[in-house]
Amino acid sequence: MIREGRDSDAEGFIALIGACWAEYPGCVMDVDGEVPELRALATHFAGQGGMLWAAERDGQVAGVVGTKPLGGGAWEICRMYLAAGERGTGLGQRLLDRAETHAKAAGAERLILWSDTRFDRAHRFYEKQSYVRQGAIRALGDLSNSLEYRYAKPARGLAVEALDAAAAASAERRLAEILVACVDAGASVSFLPPLAMDRARGFWRKVAKDVATGGRVLLAAWLDGALVGTAQLVLDMPENQPHRADVAKVLVHPDARRAGIGRALMLRIEAEARAQGRRLLVLDTAGDAGETLYRATGWQEAGTIPGFALDGHGGELATIFFWKRV
């Protein structure tokens, strides 16, 4: 059962959070010295214009999450903890959904959270929920010598953002899911179905390295808080083509198509190209749904190469090359 958190839950909150911290070497809890708000956590959140929830199982606190406004349309998800025995049951997902739904209803445009760099299990959970790392690591200067990653994502509507190397690495799992789904749906994007997740994740690890070295720009698209699309601008060109870039891997999850995501990605790609001083863009497509998108956004056909790629059944596919000046 998930209900509103109460100050009277203090003992349960302290026990839960203390147990979670104890799973990681060096994490020390000094309630009165460092986190005295745990003794009246509901009041603490209410005083900041936020909200707190508790998950209860057999009369015991099994989970907690809170959210509070930060200003400028941003809300923070905080105090997200789950008892070890509840992990993998879906309870964590329901707690996070409760906090996100409240924040969005209150006008949140962006959701932010901080997570200790040691909490690798939590990182995997947040990344599965379409959060990506953003900004610098912060040091808390506490007894635990805590360093924290900042995670964030757009909260509502359609948003396209460029990812830096840290964000690209943290988006690996979700981007791999999108790539696998697109390949399984018939997209001709260098891979044949069925595409294993390990191979897909390996591809995105290479992309993240190129982002880190400045060899490409990686875009991500969110729809109502879910990461559902991506595109790349490849900048690593021969020395006699510094004015040019390639567009690659424009992907929209099959469940999120026809919502304007592809068009938004293409418009942002063009903006990124201009920002990088690139005025000629080139791409190719094997006559799938992308062809309609590219023609609709002003791309010019350069020509067709028959039998350029194979489909999942061994049949040959023609590829059409497009170009556009921006």
Image (cartoon, rainbow, N blue to C red):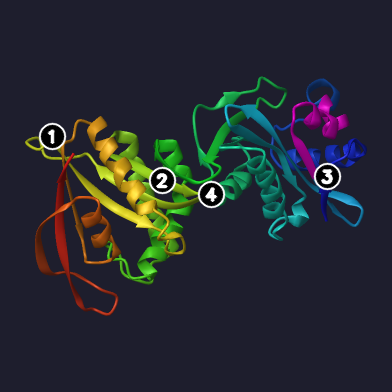
**Element on which disc 2 rests:** strand
Point out the image quarter for the C terminus: top left
Residue of label 1:
242
Q: CA distance from mark 3 to mark 1?
A: 58 Å
Residue occupying the point 31% across, 53% down: 250
Disc 4 residue type (three-letter): Asp
Residue of label 2:
220
Contact between marks 4 and 3 (CB within 8 A): the answer is no
Between residue 176 and residue 49, name the one nearer to us.
49
Dot 4 crowding, Cα within 10 Å, few <14, some 14–19, many 20+: some
The residues colored magenta run 36-53
Residue of label 3:
4
Q: Nearer the viewer, mark 4 or mark 3?
A: 4
**Element on which disc 1 rests:** loop
Counting residues from the start of the chain, the first of labels 4 and 3 encountered is 3
Tell me, yes or no, whether the highlighted magenta stretch contains residue 43.
yes
Instruction: State whether residue 115 is above or below residue 189.
Output: above
Q: Position of residue 98 (x, y in %)?
A: 71, 49
- Residue 224's disc number: 4
Disc 1 residue type (three-letter): Pro
Report whether 65 appears left or right of 220. right
Disc 3 residue type (three-letter): Glu
Report whether 269 appears left or right of 44. left
**Element on which disc 4 rests:** loop
Res 187 → quadrant:
bottom left
Report whether 278 appears left or right of 266. left
Q: Position of residue 272 (x, y in %)?
A: 29, 36
Instruction: State whether residue 258 is above or below residue 214.
Output: below
